[in-house]
Amino acid sequence: MSAQSMKTFVGIDLGSTTTKSVLIDENQQVIGRGITNSRSNYATAARVAGEEARVDGRFTLFRRALTDAGLLGDGLGDFLAGLERSFRLEQFIERLDDLEATCVGQLKGGRFAALEDRLREALAETFRRLRAEAPDLFAPGAKRKSDFFRDIAGARFYEHAEAVAREGAFPYEVLLNAYDKAIIEVENRPPSGALSEQFRRALARVLESTDGIGSGAADGIRSRIESSLEIDLEESYLVGTGYGRVTLPFSKEHIRSEILCHGLGAHLMYPHTRTVLDIGGQDTKGIQVDGHGIVTSFQMNDRCAAGCGRYLGYIADEMNMGLHELGPMAMKSDKPARINSTCTVFAGAELRDRLSLGERREDIVAGLHRAIILRAISIISRSGGVTNEFTFTGGVAKNQAAVRELRQVVKENYGEVAININPDSIYTGALGAAEFARRAYEGGSRPEGRA
Amino acid sequence: MNTNVATMKGKAADVEKDASMRKQKEMMAAHYDRLTAVPQTGEKVCSTFVPGNLNELIGCFDLVNNLPEVNAIQNGLRRTSGQYVLEAEKLGHSEDVCTYVKSDIGMIAKGNIAPNGKPFPNPDVLLLSYTGCFTFMKWFELLREQYQCETIMLHTPYMGDGKVTPNMIQYMVKQLREEVIPKLERVSGVKFDIDRLRERLARSAQAEENLVHVLQSARRRPSPIDAYFGGIYYIGPIFGAFRGTEDAIQYYRFLREEIDARVAAGAGPITPEGDMGPEKYRLVVEGPPNYTNFRQFWKMFYDEGAVVVASSYTKVGGVYDLGFRHDPQRPLETLAEYCLGVYTNRSLPMRIEMLSNYVEEYGADGLLINSIKSCNSFSAGQLLMMREVEKRTGKPAAFVESDLVDPRYFSAANIKNRLESYFQMVEQRRASARSAA
Amino acid sequence: MTMPDTATIVARASALFEDLHFSSAREWKSAAPGRKVIGYMPIYVPREIIHAAGMLPLGIVGGGDQLEVIHGDAYYQSYICRIPRSTIELGVSGRLDFVDGMLFPSICDVIRNLSGMWKLMFPHVYSRYFDVPQNYRDDIGGNYYAQELAELRDALAELRGAPVTDEALRASIVAYNDNRRLVRELYDYRIAQPWQVPAAEVYLLMRAGLVLPVEQHSELLRDYLAAARAVERPRRDNCRVVVAGVFCEQPPLNLIKSLELAGCYVVDDDLLLVTRWLTAEVPTDGDPLQNLALAFLHHSESTAAKYEPNAREKGQHLVRAVRRSKAEGVIFASPSFCDPALLDRPMLQHALSEAGIPYVSFKYAENSGQMQPIREQAGTFADSIKLWSGQ
């Protein structure tokens, strides 16, 4: 039976906006990653992110099993992607059911008792439409603004509910109100535990809709998936980190500072890195690590949060743009303006002043990116500068204009240094935490109550 | 054997609470009572500063010493400073400047009430010992405007080149002899008696000897004292209104006995919640503390088993552990040397050397800087100090920020996060050093 | 030879101002072997002694709004003013690599501590905290200061490898007396006809005095005065103000321009006080160091960094400046986090209130980018003064 059980080590990073989870195995290999928005409840966020990581972990097991069996050959990637879309659709529909039931519950009694039946019909119609279009949302190549249930369901619900309300002359606000209350409840409920069933249904749909899989091959795939589902992903040890860590019901042994986790995570991704820069929403960290991923020194932005990711958010608001549009706009500039203040409070005024003086938007925005990077470099400089391989993480690392400025400034001040930016950099802290969990277990630590 | 030690520990703790702490409480209460009773007793009041204070000299003229810095600290601990700072800002003082000054000015505007609930008397003289802090000069110019009283400037040159020159001493002695003393005579109506000054200086030296003994007890493992949070209590009498008095001698005798008893019992420092647990981290701290959240700040240390073994803040009213003692044989010269030598009057290279030596001598795991927004004298340059001390000692440093008495500038979550990260880093580095060995 | 016009002169001053590599000082240094350059920060150093040692005094007043500060921010917390970080930037970026010595005057704790930082960061540069007396008795502060001046003289003598003679000192005092006379003449001319000498031009001319040898600067001032008097410029309906608080970290040039655009003629200011710190001729006979010391004690500008021993005198220098320059109000422009300016300000304001002089206050940084709020405040102030005086 031991073959049916697998030791896993969980790292959870409770950030101010998102909570991330990483699952690794005994060989430091990443099995799964999960992310969710932090909401106001860190405990739920931790549970949801952990669950997501385990789902992701199943796919890793499927991949391993199918690869070992030599099934599907070059088509493996497409097959797994299809399976994942199908699984997400299953989950989505299940959560829609939950949402509908919860919305209906919101209508009971109260001011709308008289309207209750009609409202329930309206909801039923709204959700029917939502369900009907769900497969398209998860079709190959479909673009989703976000993978969080709230984001996908919310936008579509508003649209359909409004149409339904208009057609039937219902008060739209009542439907909205029911949704707004229900979504919080639903969001805070972890997905139901019947994952294996969801996987099976998803698999059936994929096998049905994929051409060119013979019945023999389909049986082979089915049995591999089944045996993968039987493996118990045993949570051998868990470590939490991030700003929300203190609110977790864990003892000290299960908590590590995010700086240590970040340093170790970056080391695991890039063993030669010695300097790590993380620009998040609320803070900027400069971390130096040694050849074992041990943090040797660190600095954070001082009490003034000027130049953190949030600054870009204010600028985007001020310009009436999406945060993700700032980078591309800045890339259009070939002569960035000199922006001297990274003070978030003054950002709006400075922006308007410059626009009124006729400066080009893209030059101003490019200048803002440079200002942020200069500020970050001063924090790096406080922590000891850049020695070898520089790893850049955090939300701002996804912004190509910020990355361009960083490369420039690092080159000007520290010469040619490799700069690593991992597409999964958002999981750096959680990865470090997972490795701390693995090391703690290896060192003989056991979770509480499970001696 | 075990039970014996336990009993002794218990006793030591009791003794400490009972003797030195009670003595200090009495001294402070009596002092505030004496100050606020001035309208009845007719005594005259001299306001002055802690760094470079001339308490022995003030005593020679039977003047009662009032220390605006200490009042601001009291307001911080009692959590009234926040409203005073706001009051001063309403009166036109910038949000950018020192909150000691603003707490003082706000307190005056709001009735100038002392910790004993009675109003402070107006000072008869402002003794502006301009030592190690530019703001002092502006502060007393502001108070002079308020009180319209005699103001005496004693200018202490800065030790920019890391040394005291004969020119500096002559300048200061001349100021003392020809400006400070005649003016104090005039205000007080008391004739200056140099022998009285010598007696007081001799008493100062006695207390100083015991203070140094206490501070240096932190070289032991475990350290029997916390030389920052606890240290602030220990320096109270000698930095405040009591240097040169019998009270101070008695206080430091009690304190020394109590600390010696803790050493004998192998005990660690005492905290507001009783004896600290096992000593896990030893730190040197640079910079003043925050007073509005003093206990909360302290708790972040002792909860983690962190003890401060040496600090620079406990040297702002005099650097005694490097050998200086008030010398009754050279009364005016010794006052000049005292002022010149206080911590904030020392150049940055001197401060770096002092902190690096502390890290070595006291076997610390590293340096923690609490950078204070109000205090540029301390804060400007601390980031370079941090790097230099790290470079010289090879020990990691940490940096947190707060303010003296402005509650708006204390972010507990922020500081705790950095401290925890720092302690864990020290722990991890130790573990990695062990596994490498 | 034709006389240069103001535009040509201002263009030269402007080029010197914009040159963050100090090319003119570099050229001066390389023009003859053994020449040395001594940098100094605000607020005052006795440049005569540097000059007498055959060296070039070079005023360093931060990096302004055109310097990108990359390393300087690593040394300072967010609540400390800008001038030390941009000065460090100038240092670590090599822009001051030709400077042989740096003097850090007694102005505040930040600049004081920078003196120690400089010793550590640039160990091969002669760095000195230049203390001045806060006691104004000849036999106390005077003796102390004369001795400090002697120490400076001897240190510079050691640096050049030859003594600095009294004769050389006297000659330098003559050169600087001449320069200060011209500076005062320019300031007086502006008081008389402020439309003839815009504040930004006066500022650029004063800035030139920080980098040029004194003789060249005097020539520049003479030429400018002649050129300015030769051409009548249009007169505007501006009010007349004194600008106070700008004695250390520099306001951006745009700020100075904005004040005039907003309707204020600047008729006096405390910008670059070193150029006119000593308010009377320094005697050229007798002991030159003693003369410099006594001039400091008895004939020097009042400012926040100096103790005012006489309670009744506090703030009166500003009231007098307003009266002398026939100003109608005071603009307090203070650098953010500037202890001397901000702590002194309430007392100066009280003195103005008592004298019935209106004022307005705002803060800036040397790299402030937004002038709109400043234009607005200065404009409103100018309008209110006009309304008030029209009543």
Image (spheres, rainbow, N blue to C red):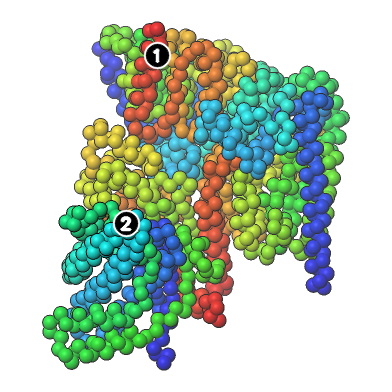
In this image, A334 relative to C379: left or right? left
Q: Mark 1 lies on which chain?
A: C
Instruction: Give me the residue at 61% from left, 25% from top.
Output: B142
In the picture shown, does residue B381 fall above or below C23? Answer: below
Whole-percent x, y for residue A260 in the image: 48, 64
Q: Which one is in front in this view, the residue at disc 2 or the one at disc 1?
A: 2
In the picture shown, does residue B394 fall above or below A198? Answer: above
**Residue C164 visible in the current orientation:** no
Q: Please name the residue that numbered disc 1 is placed on.
A: C385
* Amino acid residing under circle 2: Phe
Instruction: Give me the residue at 15% from left, 86% from top.
Output: A213
Q: Which chain carries label 2?
A: A
Instruction: Give me the residue at 42% from left, 79% from top.
Output: A8
Front residue (pair C135, C36): C135
Instruction: Give me the residue at 78% from left, 49% from top.
Output: B21
Q: Helix, strand or loop at disc 2?
A: helix
Q: Please name the residue that numbered disc 2 is placed on.
A: A112
Numbered label attached to residue A30: none
